[in-house]
Image: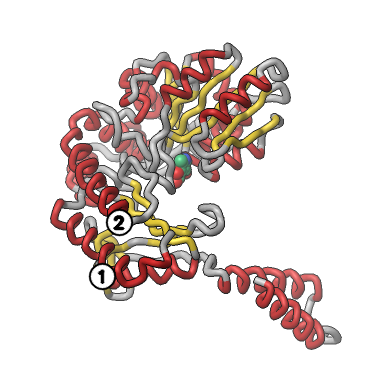
Amino acid sequence: MMRSSIIGIWRLFCALCCAVGRKDVNLPDFIFEMDMKNILEELSVSGNLRTLPEAEHSGKHIARDGRRMLNLSSNDYLGIASDGRMMADFLHEVAAVPELSGADAAGFLLSSTSSRLLTGNYPVCGKVEDALAGMFGAEAALTFSSGYHMNAGILPAVSDSGTLILADKLIHASLIDGMRLCNSKVLRYRHQDMAQLEGLVWKYRNEFSRIIIVTESIFSMDGDVTDLRRLVEIKKAVPSVMLYVDEAHAFGVRGETGLGVAQEQGCIHDVDFLCGTFGKAIASMGAYLVCSETVRRFLVNRMRTLIFTTALPPLNYLWTLRVLKELPQLGGRRKQLEENSAKVRNAVRALGLECPSGSHIVPVMVGDSNDSIRRASEMQAAGFYLLPVRPPTVPAGTSRLRISMTAAVTAEETAALISALSVQSSAGGDECR
Ligand SMILES: Cc1ncc(COP(=O)(O)O)c(C=O)c1O
């Protein structure tokens, strides 16, 4: 870090010397570019430089640089996108619609061309929301263009200066950005530290008119499962407390009919803001909140990331509706996913590695960012497409490989993965924490 800063300053100095006096160089632009190049150089030296990897997909496999690998880095948890059958049926039916012009075509458009508050609210949007409300036994539901829009928009809409937000330390960046847009006090509690959270609730209960606890049900990078029932207990002890749970990584995957951890733990109706996304297990795009009719109407009036953006295409809503209807029948996929994930979790622990996961997201802790890059490329060479997860996505010193299991992975492939992890661990186990 220190070395790269000195090199950066030296390079900036040399470049400035060359640039001064040259008429074709705009100095402020030049310095701006140099600043960015220095930061990129620092990221590169620390192993935290990001690029956009290009990959060819072929079912559950992915090809990069001519190598075919089992894709263990996607969020297609139920294998719906990779097996393609459901999507093929859907597209077949869509193509068979006799009249794809005029009024009949409206439901199949590839763009809504407008915000839902203008002309983008096609009937199928309401159908998806009615289906969700029915599945969750809720009064209403509201859908959004993505999980990012959802998390960046709900909290700023429902909170004010009299609100205290208490958020788990490891929540997703979209929630953090939402909290940054709030005019409220925000405190972060240690990851899953219910005792600390409870202490904060009791300490501040009389200072704020409302307290909102914010968490995820399955954490995206650690794969651990939140004790929602305990959170409900904490919430119920103080009347001004509300609970916001993002089920992005659990929707479709957990619970008897796939409604998430809240269904599994029997507390759907105790969560005030129960939300999730369609871009992962559902193999679609968008996000939802199940809520009361009043909250829905309020958000339609106040949620900026809903109001000021183009709605998802009607065709996308139609596909989401198809998958939602199928969801209760996908118990076999959920079972296979959990069985294989449990084997991987146990194997990682047996290697002596810390593994907080209780789900299909299984981190292999490495620590150092450059080491995680090296280990990921070794696993790729062995035929498993794993990617390193590094700061700022995870805290410094906790870089890891993130194994994202899907229902498409067979028992044989799981066994092969476990043996590749063991080989790698015995070759360099002392570097793992
Ligand atoms: C917990 C969580 N919430 C929200 C999102 C954002 O969802 P989307 O990709 O639909 O914007 C993610 C994305 O990974 C996530 O992990």
Q: Which residue lies furthest to the right in this view?
A: 21
211, 111: nearer the viewer: 211
The residue lying at 44 percent from left, 17 percent from top is: 270
Q: Is residue 413 above or below residue 335?
A: below
Q: Which amino acid does label 1 sit on?
A: Ala
The picture quadrant where one finds residue 80 is: top left
Q: How far apart are marks 1 and 2 (CA)?
A: 13 Å
Sequence-first tag of 1 and 2: 2
Image side of residue 285 versus residue 204, left or right:
left
Q: Could you tell me residue 298's position as x and y percent?
A: 57, 19
Q: In this view, does 331 lie above or below 400?
A: above
Give the residue pinned by disc 1.
Answer: 382
Say which mark, if any, is on residue 158.
none
* Horizontal side of residue 375 vs 41, given as left or right: left
Count the labels in the image.
Answer: 2
- Locate ligand 1 by image quadrant: top left
Comparing 127 with 57, the one in front is: 57
Taking the image as drawn, is residue 24 in sight? no
> Are the residues at dot 1 and dot 2 in contact (C-beta closer than 8 Å)?
no
Secondary structure beneath label 2: loop
Give x and y (percent) for residue 135.
Answer: 31, 21
